Image (spheres, rainbow, N blue to C red):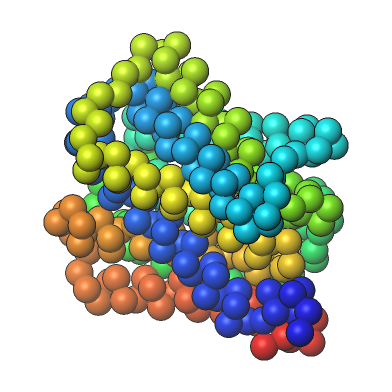
């Protein structure tokens, strides 16, 4: 069986995408735990950016090392790929996380989670209307609406939402979703001719170094590198390395809409894992969580059903 046929199989897409979302969802509570271990205050944005820089730099090194060992040769970018790496890095790692961390300092976690979920809509719209990579259909739109309803439900049921909006707060969070959406579309485009593992590794490395510089210039500092704190930082680097690389491979062989719609699972996993790992009282009852998960899964099914009907359906 050809690799392309294998990566397009429904169970492979679902399993791979859900692994990515589970890993990304676990990052929410792990980041909070990491801040506590390192003594980083909630309002200390510069130190948070510096901490993120350490994480992504380490993630880049891990991807490059693993990719080199797996390919039995040093994974190096070509001259033609340097510009692509810098573009991906500026969108995926630098712009997304700078905007997100600054925005999060000026809004609530509930509103940030809901706005972040819009990245699925934006990614599909950009792929369809801006780059013409696929066709925008009513079923894709309907699936996104159903999935977004699930994300909104699990967040709104816990309270902490109002209609007060600011550009530096909610506006920056939205701009971070736009940066992420464009990075997903560019990653799919570049993966046609470039190794997605190489792109992933070097964009993390470049972005991580830039974030470290931004954090240091902003007066940030990180201390308390205990064995437990270092182990947690290593795990979060692995989250980025594994999830983003696997996500890139899935995008290489599938449409943006078929993969991006799984992004609705990120905040759902984040809420559930935060309640478990942090013992947080989210204010969300179990039946609301189940209903939210059902809506997200229904949205994913609708979008993927549309894809199978168009292509004849690899299962």
Instruction: Say if 196 sits above or below 97 in the image.
Output: below
**Residue 182, located in which quarter of the rendered image?**
top right
Q: Residue furthest front?
A: 72
92 sits left or right of 166 in the view:
right
Q: Position of residue 263 (x, y in %)?
A: 52, 60
Residue at 64 percent across and 38 percent down: it is 202
The number of discs equals 0
Q: Position of residue 37 (x, y in %)?
A: 20, 36
Residue at 44 percent across and 74 percent down: it is 295
Q: Quarter holding the C terminus?
A: bottom right
Tell me if I can see residue 99 in this picture: no
Q: Position of residue 256 (x, y in %)?
A: 69, 61
Instruction: Say if 1 sits above or below 261 in the image.
Output: below
Residue at 34 percent across and 41 percent down: it is 233
Q: Nearer the viewer, residue 258 or 206?
A: 206
**Residue 285, located in which quarter of the rendered image?**
bottom left
Q: Position of residue 142 (x, y in %)?
A: 60, 71
274 sits left or right of 209 in the view:
left
93 sits left or right of 233 in the view:
right
Instruction: Say if 81 sits above or below 259 in the image.
Output: above
Q: Nearer the viewer, residue 237 or 24?
A: 237
Q: Quarter holding the N terminus?
A: bottom right
Residue at 47 percent across and 38 percent down: it is 58
Tell me if I can see residue 10 in this picture: yes
Q: Nearer the viewer, residue 312 or 27?
A: 27
52 sits left or right of 36 in the view:
right
């Amino acid at each position: 069986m050809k690799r392309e046929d294998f990566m397009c199989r429904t169970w492979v897409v679902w399993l791979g995408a859900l692994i990515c979302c589970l890993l990304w969802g676990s990052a929410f509570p792990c980041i909070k735990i990491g801040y506590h271990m390192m003594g980083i205050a909630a309002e200390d944005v510069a130190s948070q950016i510096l901490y993120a820089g350490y994480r992504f730099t380490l993630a880049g090194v891990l991807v490059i090392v693993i990719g080199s060992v797996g390919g039995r040769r040093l994974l190096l970018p070509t001259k033609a790929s340097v510009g692509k790496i810098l573009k991906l890095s500026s969108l995926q790692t630098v712009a997304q996380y700078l905007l997100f961390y600054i925005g999060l300092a000026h809004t609530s976690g509930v509103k940030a989670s809901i706005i972040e979920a819009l990245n699925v809509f934006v990614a599909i719209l950009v792929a369809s209307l801006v780059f013409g990579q696929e066709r925008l259909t009513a079923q894709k739109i309907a699936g996104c609406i159903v999935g977004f309803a699930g994300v909104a439900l699990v967040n709104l049921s816990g309270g902490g939402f109002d209609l007060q909006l600011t550009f530096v707060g909610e506006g920056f969070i939205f701009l971070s979703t736009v940066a992420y959406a464009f990075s997903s579309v560019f990653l799919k485009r570049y993966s046609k001719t470039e190794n997605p593992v190489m792109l992933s590794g070097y964009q993390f490395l470049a972005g991580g170094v830039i974030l470290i510089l931004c954090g240091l210039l902003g007066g940030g500092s990180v201390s308390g590198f205990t064995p437990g704190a270092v182990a947690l930082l290593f795990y979060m680097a692995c989250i980025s390395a594994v999830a983003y690389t696997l996500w890139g491979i899935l995008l290489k062989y599938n449409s943006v809409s078929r993969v991006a719609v799984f992004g609705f699972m990120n905040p759902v996993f984040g809420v559930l894992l935060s309640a478990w790992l942090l013992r947080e009282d989210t204010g969300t009852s179990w039946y609301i969580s189940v209903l939210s998960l059902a809506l997200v899964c229904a949205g994913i099914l609708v979008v993927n059903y549309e894809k199978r009907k168009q292509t004849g359906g690899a299962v």
